[in-house]
Image (cartoon, rainbow, N blue to C red):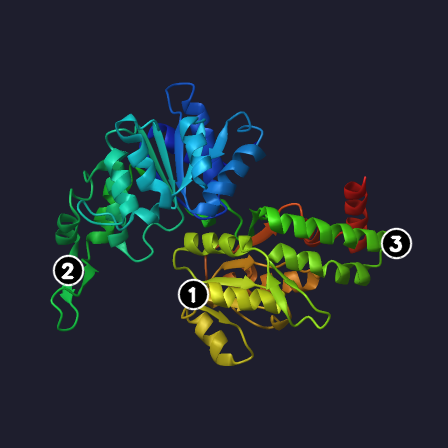
Amino acid sequence: MKLHSYQHSIANHIIDNPRCAIWASMGMGKSLATLTALDTLDLMEDVYPVLVIAPLRVAKYTWPSEVAKWPGTQHMQCQFIGGTPANRKKTWADLVDINTVNFELLPQLVKHFGDDWPFRTVVVDESTRLKSFRITQGSARARALSKVAHTKVNRFVQLTGTPSPQGLTDLWGQIWFLDRGFRLGQSFTGFEKRWFRSEQIGPNAHARKLHALPHAQQEIQEKLQDICLTIEAKDYLDINEPVVNHVEVVLPPKAREIYDDMEQRFFAELEDEGVEAANAAAKSMKCLQIANGALYVNEGSTEWEEIHDAKIQALDSVIEEANGTPVLVAYKFKSDLARLLKAFPQAVAMDKRGETIEAWNAGEIPLMLLHPQSAGHGLSLQHGGNILVFFSLDWSLENWLQVIERIGPARQKQSGYDRPVFVHHLIAADTVDELVLQRLTSKRSVQDILMDAMKRRTT
């Protein structure tokens, strides 16, 4: 395992600052750098047990997967301590090195341990969830965490890609957990009076909007520079190439059973008939549908049944970490589109009307859904954003490249944007998704990839 230079910077910042924040985009390796820092600190002080607080899918799958994936962290024990009451009872009684939990369980966790709070280190992944905290107000989760943050926790690390999506006011609640108000004021009211002008909106005296004063940005940055490390991708990565991130999705048990049965029949048919690219790609569609979360149940491909929402949850995590930055999502099946529109009311499906494309490029659409075959040559979407998510994968290399090119590095530079392009693939683990990704990234033939997979899985 070899860390990038910016990951060393992250790890060193955590080691040097017991209470700190890392502001770095998704795909920059924040979690691995954090684990590396914890492993190093373990040689010098007691950092375990660690509590990692994150959105549900990230806590349940991403952190345990990161620990298991890298040789330098595989010796660590990691467990998800949320879920069913039975799992909570077992894991809360038997903590390990890295213990992950979702935000929703914070009140129960704090109440359960009380004065015997055992976690020496707390890592908050997606710290903007703490932004609404106030001394006497805020979410129940943040208020619960505030009871132990300064009295029971030695090290407190915050991770996020966009710390202030709605403006500077988002910072006070997060920073309080690091310094108890030392830098930005001991109350939000004091913070507000020092750096903002309040304007009444309409006849309601309580409806007010805050406007940052001219000196606010510079002064707040100076006060936070010692504990907050900002890692900008453009400073470390080649922005002439997309930053590619594979987001692994684990199928729920019932979906796994359905998928395995379908894949076994699929490979058996290919073995009997011989592998031909067009035929094989077509036959794999059922497996791809299940990996995405819905399966067509008739020959006319008009009716479908939902099987799981694992990819929906994964996309939600990406959108959340984007923190208001527009996201472009590529889908394949009509069932994907229907489910995405239902799950994300703010989403807009790209159509042939120029108004939709203009609205996207003007930054008016936070989430746009795109079918690869509609992303023809000459279509420019780079003005609208630089984050692309493949909800669904397709065997077509041309389609894949075509979609990336719509917001790609060349178009970004031509339009004067000095920013990298992030490409996230939502990959259902141990499914045809992985085989399609091999095809796209290695340009190997469909036949070769399927033949290799068939040999592995039938022996």
Q: How crowded is mark 1: few (under 14 residues within 10 Å), some or many (20 or more)?
A: some
- Between discs 2 and 1, the one toward the N terminus: 2
Please give the residue where the numbered disc 2 appears in the rendered image.
Answer: 197
Residue 3 visible? The answer is: no
Residue 326: name its quadrant: bottom left
Q: Which residue is drawn at 48% across and 47% down?
A: 57
Pick the front one: 248 or 245:
248
Callout 2, which amino acid? Arg
Q: In this view, does 233 lie to the left or right of 330?
A: left
Using the numbered discs, state the Cα–Cα distance from disc 3 to disc 1 in whole angstroms.
47 Å
Callout 3, which amino acid? Asp
Residue 272's mark?
Answer: 3
Pick the front one: 252 or 66:
252
- Between discs 2 and 3, the one toward the N terminus: 2
Callout 1, which amino acid? Pro
Residue placed farthest to the front in the image?
Answer: 86
Residue 358: where, in percent of width, then height?
46, 76
Residue placed farthest to the right in the image?
Answer: 273
Residue 194: where, in percent of width, then height?
13, 51
Residue 209: where, in percent of width, then height?
19, 63
Using the numbered discs, state the Cα–Cα distance from disc 2 to disc 3 in whole angstroms.
74 Å
Q: In this view, does 146 lie to the left or right of 71?
A: left
